[in-house]
Image (cartoon, coloured by chain):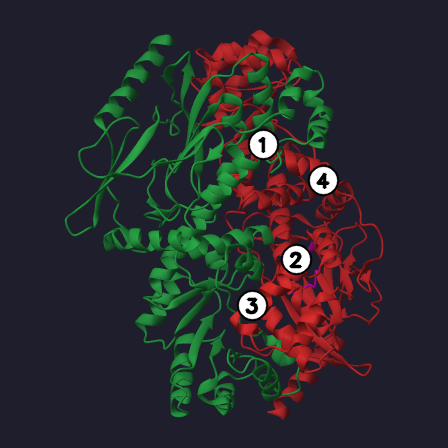
Chain colours: A red, B green
């Protein structure tokens, strides 16, 4: 991965650190200050791509020449560019496993590395973790709304470019989707792929039935017919000619709930009880809940734009903040005081407690080296000296982990509107460190 | 580019077309049905990447083997996979140049190609044009709000992955930004790159002034100091020690308008009239307008999340619809009738009229082969037989084109809230074709 995949100031700060002889190790924590509106939890995702980036990060000669040619770098000492030639990430990384449920303020990932390295990687780590966590979290909501019916990620065409589409599909799968329509994502991550047919296919034939015949002939065991190009109910009657072998039908417009009831009746009367009804068309967790409340007879939901761009909350405000700097083996805590943007200093660990019934009861954000009497720690060391410590879990394990975590989160914290706030507190020792440091900074001024 | 960068149904439909001997040429038009809330125009972008995709599109053996292994393709005739081996896009493409202002219903791009080819490319074309057009359009609003002051795209960390960040930077530049913080985008597209320093840099030193010294020493001619890590006004006083050579200062929190006035006074008193004030921190077109109305002394705006994810309207509903199919040289129009999703048939051209003062007065969507007495046609043929017809404009030309187009759009159509609707009508001939076809379809049923 290109070392230029970052913001310019990371590289100018790197030069300033380098040319001022600042090579101390430092720790940065990535966390979300405040959850987006109507989000009560996040499902962490994107770690695999983050670690891949850290492992492969380097600067090619061409990239270094580009930097050298920028006006801002014109008079910068050549030593810095020589340093970039050999640049590798050599740090340590702790993170919560993908699929872990996390809350505001909790570190999702921590980097400990020489200042320059820790700084350069900020932008890419944030872009990666923010986005996949955003989509996995939205997916979890949509999947919950479907009450056990499958949700398929259908949003590639509305994603922020095809690159975003690939990782949206991955994150949506972690968040509980049964698969995606995105073939490249399917191939890259071994995600089940799903598809039906488009209106254009029907329209390319003179009559709808001709189009249905043409498709069924090629895919007799896996045809899902799109019914709403002309008249959905009429098309459902046409579909009965294929009998119980017909895998499914798709409804994509008008009143999906009412149509699903009508179509179900038509299919059932034709002995096609096993033919599934898939619905699509601007769906989200609220519409799906409403449809199921109203008795919709839908087996699968194809969800695009709302899921794949997290349209109601399309950006996650993850930040990456300096928490300490190490001078000659002495670790000095650091914090930011800016109003509304103040941070907690020191490397942290999150401890999660559960009741006897297994349900989560609350989290404590503590100092990394504190040991809590109860609960389990969420952050795990995943990288040391720039090398991954173990092969991460596969995508299906992450997906099961997310599902397991969500089951243990009491339902009040999972409500789609006005959810309860999950109790997250800071340990006494961490609060004390923070106050001490605030006093120290105030005294310095 | 991988042929798998698409939705599964494009490939199953491709197989159905192939195995039913359907190789007719067909035309699909990409347009936006309805503009997002509070958008009164769009700035088209993404064509260069779309054409690059069409030029490079193919299926590797590995990709074909992946498809062959999918359950849905299990019994599909081997002929289809042989066909994919030699697959190239051979079609014709018409499009509006990047930077062109477009409105709802107007084709941004049209593909005419054998059904299979035209269908497979849908997903990638939509993802590309939807996203870049979305961001260029948002950028145009933010840039307008800055009333001539520079806007820098700062959003990489909140984008939908780093891939999205690269194209957000490109589109934002077309939409009028002066540059980006994204170095990789700068290198790829020769976009000016900008940067300042982060809070972490200040915090890595014992005292703020030490951090300022360390940075200024390395970049004496291009230092922009971040002032708000501890106390902005105090930091502004510290900054005066660097004198008029200091390029700029950045404010990133609290009341940016009031702080800018205070900081401006401090700098001016120190004879630093040329030292620029850059503001950042969750800005958008509304906040910038308000700040300038309130007399903010800000020279440059760094805009991130709101711009780079188009947070208030994060998805563009571009669609790609079949408009005709060619049988033995006879072109048959096609349209979709679904309620709320009906389309206009036939290949189209958009004619834009301007008054004597140069301001745009209205558009007419006409049949491709109609010639209007007034106005100029927007769609240009850019690809024939799968080959680009000419080297496209460079990014600066696109940016000037957008700026020129926006200047010609009367201000009522550019208001940020409740803008007027720009007059777009369909030609009589096109309306007639549509009614004829509707009658024909109704008669067939």
The residue depicted at 73 percent of the width and 65 percent of the height is: A110
Q: Which residue is mark 2?
A: A2
**What is the secondary structure assignment of the residue under circle 2?**
loop
Please tell me if label 2 and label 4 are on a single chain: yes
Q: Residues within 10 Å of mark 2 (few under 14, many from 20)?
A: few
Q: CA distance from mark 4 to mark 3?
A: 39 Å
Q: Disc 2 or 3, which lies upstream in sequence? A: 2
Where B372 falls versus A231 (above or below)? below
Label number found at residue A69: 3
Label number found at residue B7: 1
Q: Residues within 10 Å of mark 4 (few under 14, many from 20)?
A: some
Q: Which residues are magenta?
A: A101-108
Q: How many marks?
A: 4
Instruction: Please give the chain letter of the residue carrying mark 1.
Output: B
Using the rendered view, name the quadrant where residue B198 is placed. Answer: bottom right
Q: Which residue is mark 4?
A: A189
Magenta run includes residue A395: no
The residue depicted at 33 percent of the width and 12 percent of the height is: B440
**What is the secondary structure assignment of the residue under circle 3?**
helix
Q: CA distance from mark 4 to mark 1?
A: 15 Å
């Amino acid at each position: 991965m290109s070392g230029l995949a970052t913001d310019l100031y990371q590289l100018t700060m790197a030069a300033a650190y380098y040319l001022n002889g600042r090579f101390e190790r430092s720790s940065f924590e990535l966390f979300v200050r405040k959850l987006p509106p109507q989000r009560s939890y996040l499902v962490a995702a994107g770690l695999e791509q983050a670690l891949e980036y850290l492992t492969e990060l380097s600067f090619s000669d061409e990239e270094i020449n580009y930097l050298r040619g920028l006006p801002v770098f014109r008079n910068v000492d050549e030593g810095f560019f020589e340093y970039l030639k050999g640049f590798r990430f050599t740090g340590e990384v702790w993170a919560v496993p993908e699929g872990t449920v996390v809350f505001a303020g909790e570190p999702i990932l921590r980097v400990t590395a020489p200042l320059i390295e820790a700084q350069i990687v900020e932008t890419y780590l944030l872009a990666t973790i923010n986005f996949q966590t955003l989509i996995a979290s939205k997916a979890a909501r949509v999947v919950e709304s479907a009450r056990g019916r499958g949700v398929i990620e259908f949003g590639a065409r509305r994603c922020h470019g095809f690159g975003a589409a690939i990782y949206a599909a991955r994150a949506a799968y972690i968040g509980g989707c049964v698969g995606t329509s995105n073939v490249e994502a399917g191939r890259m991550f071994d995600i089940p792929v799903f598809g039906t047919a488009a209106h254009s296919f029907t329209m390319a034939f003179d009559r709808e039935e001709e189009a249905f015949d043409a498709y069924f002939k090629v895919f007799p065991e896996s045809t899902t017919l799109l019914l709403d190009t002309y008249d959905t109910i009429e098309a459902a009657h046409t579909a009965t000619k294929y009998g119980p072998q017909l895998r499914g039908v798709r409804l994509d417009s008008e009143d999906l709930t009412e149509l699903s009831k009508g179509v179900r009746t038509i299919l059932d009367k034709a002995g096609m009880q096993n033919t599934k009804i898939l619905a699509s068309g601007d769906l989200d967790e609220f519409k799906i809940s409403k449809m199921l409340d109203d008795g919709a007879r839908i087996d699968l939901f194809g969800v695009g734009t709302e899921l794949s761009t997290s349209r109601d909350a399309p950006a996650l405000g993850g930040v990456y903040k300096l928490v300490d700097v190490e001078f000659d083996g002495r670790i000095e805590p650091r914090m930011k005081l800016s109003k509304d943007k103040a941070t907690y200093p020191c490397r942290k660990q999150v401890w999660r407690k559960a009741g006897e019934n297994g349900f989560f009861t609350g989290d404590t954000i503590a100092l990394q080296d504190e040991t809590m009497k109860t609960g389990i720690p969420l952050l795990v060391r995943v990288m040391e000296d720039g090398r991954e410590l173990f092969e991460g879990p596969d995508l299906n394990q992450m997906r099961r982990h997310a599902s397991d975590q969500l089951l243990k989160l009491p339902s009040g914290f999972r409500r789609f509107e006005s959810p309860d706030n999950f109790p997250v507190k800071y340990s006494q020792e961490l609060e004390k460190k923070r106050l001490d440091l605030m006093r120290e900074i105030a005294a310095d001024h």
